[in-house]
Image (cartoon, helix red, strand yellow):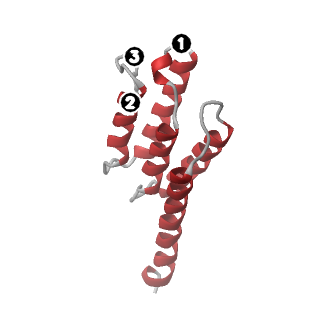
Amino acid sequence: MNISLTLLASSLSCIRQKDAWAKSNDLNKASKTQAMLHKMIDLYEGGQRSLRPSNIAYNTVLNACAFTRDGDKNDAFLIAIKTYNELRQSQYCKPDAVSYGTLLKGKVSIWFTVVWSLIFVST
């Protein structure tokens, strides 16, 4: 996956792109939004001050994970946990109510799917 943020002027542009992926039906949206967040952090630490990571940037990745539908749910769950832990340890921002709620939404969605498949699909 080739993600270039050098053309993006601001953190807002970066967040909008991640939000578009998060709302898409792309099977790899969790990993794409996570990769974009990591690139954003790298560029910020490299001197592009307009790309400072924020709660919105992290929460967009959590949202992409929460709404992953098909095949990649296990990967999305692991990405969500990793992203949440990165947010907890971030020097730029900390989890907020949206972070907690989105993380729970993802867990509930994944657990609901597992329980649903165990109860109704396997009978």
Query: Which sits earlier in the primary sequence, circle 2 or circle 3?
Result: 3
Query: Which sits earlier in the primary sequence, circle 2 or circle 1?
Result: 2
How crowded pointer 2 is (Cα within 10 Å; few <14, some 14-19, many 20+) is rated as some
From this viewpoint, which residue is outermost toward the front?
97
Residue at 39%, 16% (x, y): give it. 6
Q: Position of residue 30 (x, y in %)?
A: 45, 45
- Answer with left or right where residue 116 lies relative to residue 89: left
Which of the two residues, 37 or 110, is positioned nearer the viewer here? 37
Vertical comparison of 102 with 8: above or below:
below
| Residue assigned mark 1 | 47
| Residue assigned mark 2 | 12
Q: Secondary structure at mark 1?
A: loop
| Residue assigned mark 3 | 6
Which disc is residue 36 wearing? none
Query: Which sits earlier in the primary sequence, circle 3 or circle 1?
Result: 3
Q: Secondary structure at mark 2?
A: helix
From this viewpoint, which residue is outermost toward the right?
89
Residue at 41%, 30% (x, y): give it. 1
Residue at 40%, 35% (x, y): give it. 15
Q: Amino acid at mark 1?
A: Gly
Q: Amino acid at mark 2?
A: Leu
Q: Which tag is nearer the camera, tag 2 or tag 3? A: 2
- Answer with left or right where residue 22 lies relative to residue 48: left
Q: Amino acid at mark 3?
A: Thr
Vertical comparison of 118 with 23: above or below:
below
Find the distance from the CA under tag 3 to the CA under tag 1. 12 Å
Find the distance from the CA under tag 2 to the CA under tag 3. 14 Å
Image mark count: 3
Residue at 60%, 50% (x, y): give it. 81
How crowded pointer 3 is (Cα within 10 Å; few <14, some 14-19, many 20+) is rated as few
